[in-house]
Image (tube, rainbow, N blue to C red):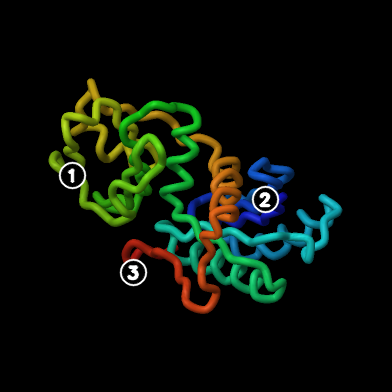
């Protein structure tokens, strides 16, 4: 049995959710990026109170590590690390791109590659690539999008591109092999992944773990 508090403030919408054994119990969201800092701590308090769960009963605290909004990542990491330290519970850090990939893989299983794309302004995106078992093929990084940015091996017949930066690649995409689905439910995906990380004991170091900003100048 694992009861995990999940925090995500890496994108436009932030969320706090409670999940037991990988299944989401309750969640709260905030769609105003500038209000993430004010939202998170109040949301955690309200979520626990509304669920009748004491903070001490949590088994771990999970947070998305980026890439994404510079300010949002700092806010989320500070909240998660503070709770983890105060409660003496393990900290789980999961890349935003992996959560996005899991959300699409759940809806579209059987793909060869899953490539989340987060708008990094101008003609750049934060991206990564994961295979059908969610193994990391290409780690999260920033890319300037042009006609040769995402040319994969011919062995990859089904490649999914998604996220708010995917439109930048669409004009150059191979229409027979590249697909552009909507991103799935990232809150549910994070609940599932944090459960896996917990049981595999893939915990982050509270003292030394930092967000993956992607590039230092992406601020909001």
Position of residue 148 relative to residue 1, above or below, is: above
Which residue is at a point 41% across and 42% down the rendered structure image?
Answer: 134
Per the model, the C-alpha gap separating discs 3 and 2 is 28 Å
Say which residue label 1 marks: 149
Tag 1 or tag 2, which sits nearer the N-term? 2
Tag 3 or tag 1, which sits nearer the N-term? 1
Which residue is at a point 31% across and 54% down the rendered structure image?
Answer: 139
Position of residue 197 relative to residue 150, above or below, is: below
Residue 200 screen position, x and y as percent: 54, 54
Residue 155 screen position, x and y as percent: 20, 30
Quadrant hosting residue 36: bottom right
Q: Nearer the viewer, mark 1 or mark 3?
A: 1
Q: For this view, does 141 lie left or right of residue 153?
A: right
Quadrant hosting residue 87: bottom right
Say which residue label 2 marks: 17
Position of residue 44 relative to residue 97, above or below, is: below
Say which residue label 3 marks: 216
Residue 132 screen position, x and y as percent: 38, 35
Per the model, the C-alpha gap separating discs 1 and 3 is 21 Å
Per the model, the C-alpha gap separating discs 2 and 1 is 35 Å
Tell me the SS state at disc 3: loop
């Amino acid at each position: 049995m694992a009861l995990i508090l999940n925090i995500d403030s890496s994108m436009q919408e932030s969320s706090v959710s409670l999940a037991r054994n990988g299944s989401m119990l309750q969640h709260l969201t905030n769609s105003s990026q500038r209000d993430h800092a004010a939202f998170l701590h109040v949301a955690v308090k309200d979520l626990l109170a509304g669920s009748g769960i004491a903070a001490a009963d949590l088994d771990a605290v999970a947070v998305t590590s980026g890439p994404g909004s510079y300010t949002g990542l700092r806010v989320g990491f500070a909240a998660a690390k503070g709770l983890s330290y105060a409660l003496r519970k393990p900290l789980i850090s999961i890349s935003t791109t992996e959560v996005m990939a899991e959300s699409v893989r759940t809806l579209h299983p059987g793909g060869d590659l899953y490539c989340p794309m987060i708008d990094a302004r101008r003609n750049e995106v934060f991206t990564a690539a994961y295979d059908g078992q969610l193994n990391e093929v290409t780690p999260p990084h920033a890319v300037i999008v042009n006609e040769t940015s995402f040319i994969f091996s011919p062995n990859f017949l089904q490649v999914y591109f998604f996220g708010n930066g995917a439109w930048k690649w669409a004009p150059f995409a191979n229409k027979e092999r590249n697909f552009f689905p909507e991103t799935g439910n990232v809150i549910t995906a994070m609940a599932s992944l944090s459960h896996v990380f917990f049981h595999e004991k893939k915990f982050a170091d509270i003292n030394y773990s930092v967000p993956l900003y992607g590039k230092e100048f992406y601020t909001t």
